[in-house]
Amino acid sequence: MIVAGLALSDAPAAGAAPQYIDHTQWSTWSGKPSLRVFPTAVGRRTARPSAVSQGEVAWAQVLADAPDADTPGMRAQFLCHWYFAEMAGPGKSSWNLEPWRPVVDDAAMVQSGCNPGGAEERF
């Protein structure tokens, strides 16, 4: 059943955070590691610059599924995707994070399209 644009099956249990991340998957792109983050429909609807606290909850969900993603720069890449990916390229199948990308400040992260140090990977 759909209520106010939210399927009841999407609703979290009382007191629980919504599930923003469906799953993650490590892949290789051009011989380098890449973590593919697959947001849920709720995650896609929630992701935006004003959803800072939800972004942190979503990052915790990424780490619960891929604890080895907790490396320098990965959180910043994820939050950049959380804030801007659905506005810039709605519906992309995954938000891809790479541990080999350089750690940069927020301005450089946004200017690079969340992909500092190289082109966006295409799977």
Image (cartoon, rainbow, N blue to C red):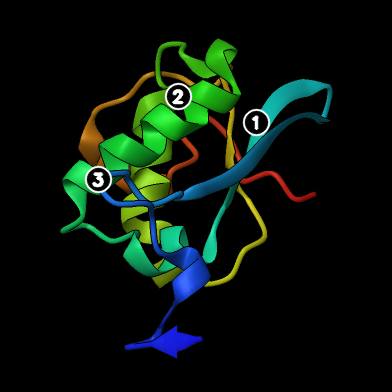
Report, in whole angstroms, how far the alpha carbon at label 1 lies from the one at label 2: 9 Å
The residue tagged 2 is 74
The three-letter amino acid code for the residue at tag 2 is: Met
- Tell whether label 2 touches label 1 (CB within 8 Å): yes
Observer-side mark, 3 or 1, equals 3
- Is residue 89 among the parts visible in the rendering? no
Q: Is 27 left, or right, of 84 in this rendering?
A: right
Choose the circle earlier in sequence order: 2 or 3.
3
The residue tagged 3 is 15
The residue tagged 1 is 35
Q: Is residue 102 above or below residue 80?
A: above
The residue lying at 45 percent from left, 74 percent from top is 8
- Is residue 39 among the parts visible in the rendering? yes
Residue 35, horizontal then vertical, whole percent? 65, 31
The three-letter amino acid code for the residue at tag 1 is: Leu
For label 1, the crowd category at 10 Å Cα-Cα, with few meaning under 14, some 14 to 19 and many 20 or more, is many
Q: Secondary structure at mark 2?
A: helix
For label 2, the crowd category at 10 Å Cα-Cα, with few meaning under 14, some 14 to 19 and many 20 or more, is many
Q: Nearer the viewer, residue 94 or 53?
A: 53
Q: In the displayed image of the protein, which residue is found farthest to the front?
A: 14
Q: Quadrant of residue 24?
A: top right
- Tell whether label 3 touches label 2 (CB within 8 Å): no
Q: Secondary structure at mark 3?
A: loop
Q: Is 48 left, or right, of 81 in this rendering?
A: left
For label 3, the crowd category at 10 Å Cα-Cα, with few meaning under 14, some 14 to 19 and many 20 or more, is few
Q: Quadrant of residue 26?
A: top right
The residue lying at 33 percent from left, 63 percent from top is 46
The three-letter amino acid code for the residue at tag 3 is: Gly
Q: Is residue 31 above or below residue 36?
A: above
Q: Quadrant of residue 12?
A: bottom left
